[in-house]
Amino acid sequence: MVDLAGKRIGVVGAQSSTINCINGLMRGGYAISRLITLPPEMSAPVADYADLRVFARANGIPCIHVGAYDMKDPVTRERLSDVCLDVVTVVGWQRLIPEWFLLKIPCGVYGMHGSALPLPKGRGRSPMNWSIIEGRDRFYTHLFRYDAGIDSGEIVDCQRFDINPWDTIRSLQHKNSVSQYKLLVKNLPAILNGAITSIPQDKAIQPSFYPKRTFEDGAIDWKQSSAIEIAALVRAVARPYPGAYTEFENTRIMIWQAAPFDSCIEYPEAAPGTIVEAFSDKTFVVKCFVDSLLVLECETTSAWQPACGMRFTSLPNASRQKLAQMKIDEGA
């Protein structure tokens, strides 16, 4: 274990990334004194929720359930009233941390936020999903000290990693988890010894905020989207997220894996959304706005099977409007 003279480290989180980060910290020699998490009955709003009780028990970490996700309720305050921690790191928690808790921790509460651009650009919701959809090629995981704002705290350190054309949201989550624990292993000694330096976010730069995503943001609009755009959407909302989807008559088809088919083989007579090839292995090709998409994995609750000539409904998707509004709001 790292010798920090009895310093007590707490973790707040409720996702699989929380487990990955704690495992990385323990491999780096750090002991976790408390795990503050969300009980299963409050898991509905949490993408990739993980019930951490078994993990905590197996690793000898005392586990405390909050009474509300925002931690502003009296039950949470009571449960944490006697908890003495020197530093807290927040990983896999999609709510702000209330001021009463920030003031309770002497060495500070530190969180992670990622963005396709250095902060203050790209604050807000679901930055990895949005970054794939935008076609970005890199991502920045920031370690920052919490304040009362939205991802607005002073920056301690940053780890950059690639977004490759073959990355899915799952592989980005893994890269982000590695970045998170590496940042903590590197910086926790200075944080706990009061020697850390941090840099305020540049107030001369207008912040931007990624908008909230909903299930409907996974809808596929065959008439307005290229194969590259649809494939990016599929990668961005693949498992553990709800997935991209289309519809044929009254049947919803979830598309979990897809790729642009070809730039030379054309189907000029087919309308967007039409299945133009159906192969014996159950994969199929769909005509898009200007090109075509190879669907490699799909799922439906019915007995539906792909066949040439079937035409999917082009469904409205507000993602373009949301991103456009984000750029308007930041003055782009």
Image: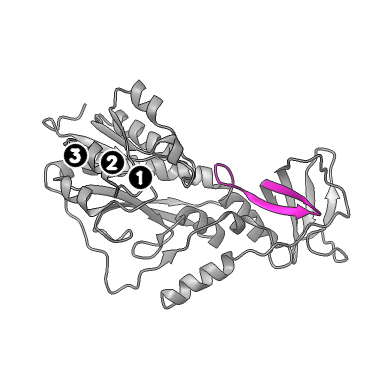
Can residue 295 be seen by looking at this rendering? Answer: yes
In magenta segment, residue 247? yes
Amino acid type for the residue under numbered disc 2: Val
Does residue 236 appear to the left or right of 117 in the view shown? right
Amino acid type for the residue under numbered disc 3: Ser
Amino acid type for the residue under numbered disc 1: Ala
Q: Are marks 2 and 1 in contact (CB under 8 Å)?
A: yes
- Circle 3 sits on which residue? 81
Tag 2: Cα neighbours inside 10 Å, few (<14), some, or many (≥20)?
Answer: some
Query: Observer-nearest residue: 166 or 288?
Result: 288
Is 169 located above or below residue 269 in the figure?
A: above
- Circle 1 sits on which residue? 68
The image quarter in which residue 292 lies: bottom right
Q: Which residues are magenta?
A: 238-255
Query: How far, Cα to Cα, is label 3 from label 2?
Result: 10 Å
Is 231 located above or below residue 192 in the figure?
A: below
Residue 313 position within the rendered picture, expressed as x and y whole percent measured from the top left: 77, 60
Instruction: Please give the name of the residue rendered at 19% of the width and 39% of the height, measured from the top-left corner.
Output: 81
- Circle 2 sits on which residue? 75
Query: How far, Cα to Cα, is label 2 from label 1?
Result: 8 Å
Instruction: Please give the name of the residue rendered at 13% of the width and 30% of the height, measured from the top-left corner.
Output: 6
Tag 1: Cα neighbours inside 10 Å, few (<14), some, or many (≥20)?
Answer: some
Counting residues from the start of the chain, the first of labels 2 and 1 encountered is 1
Q: How is the image coloured?
A: one colour
User: Which quadrant of the rendered structure holds the C terminus?
Assistant: bottom left
Query: How far, Cα to Cα, is label 1 from label 3?
Result: 15 Å
Is 218 located above or below residue 35 in the figure?
A: below
Tag 3: Cα neighbours inside 10 Å, few (<14), some, or many (≥20)?
Answer: few
Q: Secondary structure at mark 2?
A: helix
Query: Observer-nearest residue: 288 or 96?
Result: 96
The image quarter in which residue 239 lies: top right
